């Protein structure tokens, strides 16, 4: 089973890939608008998985940003972008996966959206972390990964969206849409598993 | 991380245990009313995991059967029994898991029930298969397990409930409540993983 795992360089998508790697052939897939340099490939290398970049068109960034500013809140835009990323990955892999978790608000596809994605693309969409809560995820991460935390690390596409938003709507709009303490994880290494 | 995985001897609970075994210490837990001989322990042995039985009281079988007959349908009773089994396992393990899947109708706890279980018992409840659809599960099973299928194999507690129901309500009630083609899986062996 060959699986394309959407990969941001963060903890959750890395864990999803590691869980699947015990029984599937993994390729990490990072989507990017190509606006900000992206070093997800180097994180993939640390994890020991092959990595591909998929470029996203500028019009999608604009549409996503418009959606976020209209809502004053990023969740619908994030999920829209994530669905598009899944669809692009679905053009290349028979099975597509991501790091979405039980307690995530966004991106998170509902049951209807999952069925629709699978039916339209004739793929399987797998979410290895969906049955795990925050504490179990932390235990998993602690067993498998070295992680640092920071506000909006440079290779997440949120940085690109912030830039596009600032240009179109001004930096005040960015402060309204994106909560100030949005801490994201970045994987810096992989541990051996010890029971 | 020590995890108690509810185990019926079937495919799904076996897969849940195998997925978790890559990073956690597994113990398989089978609940039984002690009415029908149960050989889940021998299946656990084939899988290579330690196994414990937890006895359930007869009053719970009666309450479950009453619920099923009242509904004319087994789902609410199955979920009630499953929740009780999770609570019993939660008395012994810091993390409790099961084989429930994305497309399961029952047993399946909703978000509120999951939170309630975790808060009351101060455990983590993990569902390793929750993010997997039917085709992905079949691929997983094919990679890991040798499985046979049959109608209501002898060691599932459904057999016990059918017996209790027949005694209290007659065999016609059993036919009403349990669909005739309810095929269940039984694990007979474990494969090596080949990519």
Image (tube, coloured by chain):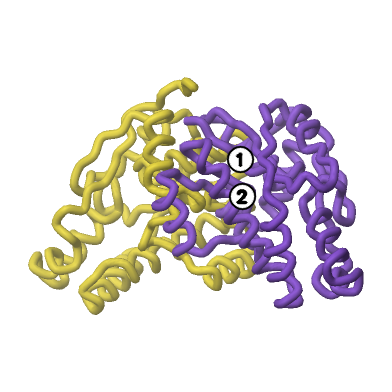
Chain colours: A purple, B yellow
Instruction: Using the image as rendered, state which of residue A51 and residue A47 is in the foreground.
Output: A51
- Residue B1 visible to an observer of this rendering: no
Using the image, tell me which numbered label, if any, was put on residue A5.
1
Q: For numbered disc 2, what is the local secondary structure? A: helix
The reply to whether the C-beta atoms of the residues labelled 1 and 2 are less than 8 Å apart is no
Instruction: Using the image as rendered, state which of residue B63 and residue B19 is in the foreground.
Output: B19
Residue B161 falls in image quadrant: bottom left
Which mark sits nearer the N-terminus, 1 or 2? 1
Residue pictured at 42% horizontal, 52% vertical: A120
Position of residue A65 relative to residue B25, above or below, is below
Residue B52: % across, % down? 46, 43
Residue pictured at 8% horizontal, 68% vertical: B172
Residue pictured at 40% horizontal, 35% vertical: B139
Instruction: Using the image as rendered, state which of residue B108 and residue A184 is in the foreground.
Output: A184
Across the whole image, how many numbered discs are drawn on residues?
A: 2
| B73 sits left or right of B80 in the view | left
The C terminus of chain A appears in which quarter of the rendering?
Answer: top right
Determine which residue is flagged by label 2: A85
Residue B122: % across, % down? 66, 63
Residue A29: % across, % down? 65, 38
Label 2 resides on the chain identified as: A
- Residue A64 visible to an observer of this rendering: yes
Label 1 resides on the chain identified as: A
| A30 sits left or right of B53 in the view | right
Residue A42: % across, % down? 80, 31
| A114 sits left or right of A102 in the view | left
Distance between mark 1 and mark 2 Cα atoms: 11 Å
């Amino acid at each position: 089973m060959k699986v394309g795992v959407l990969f941001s360089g963060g903890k959750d998508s890395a864990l999803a890939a590691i869980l699947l790697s015990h029984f599937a052939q993994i390729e990490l897939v990072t989507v990017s608008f190509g606006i900000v340099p992206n070093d997800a490939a180097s994180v993939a290398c640390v994890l020991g998985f092959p990595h591909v970049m998929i470029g996203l068109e500028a019009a999608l960034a604009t549409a996503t940003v418009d959606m976020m500013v209209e809502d004053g809140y990023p969740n619908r835009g994030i999920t829209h972008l994530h669905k598009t990323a899944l669809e692009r990955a679905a053009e290349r892999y028979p099975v597509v996966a991501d790091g979405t978790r039980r307690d995530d608000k966004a991106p998170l596809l509902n049951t209807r959206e999952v069925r629709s994605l699978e039916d339209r693309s004739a793929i399987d969409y797998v979410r290895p972390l969906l049955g795990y809560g925050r504490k179990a995820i932390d235990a998993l991460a602690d067993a498998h990964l070295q992680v640092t935390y920071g506000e909006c690390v440079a290779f997440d596409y949120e940085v690109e969206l912030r830039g596009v938003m600032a240009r179109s709507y001004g930096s005040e709009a960015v402060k309204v849409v994106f909560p100030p303490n949005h801490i994201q994880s970045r994987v810096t290494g992989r541990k051996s598993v010890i029971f």
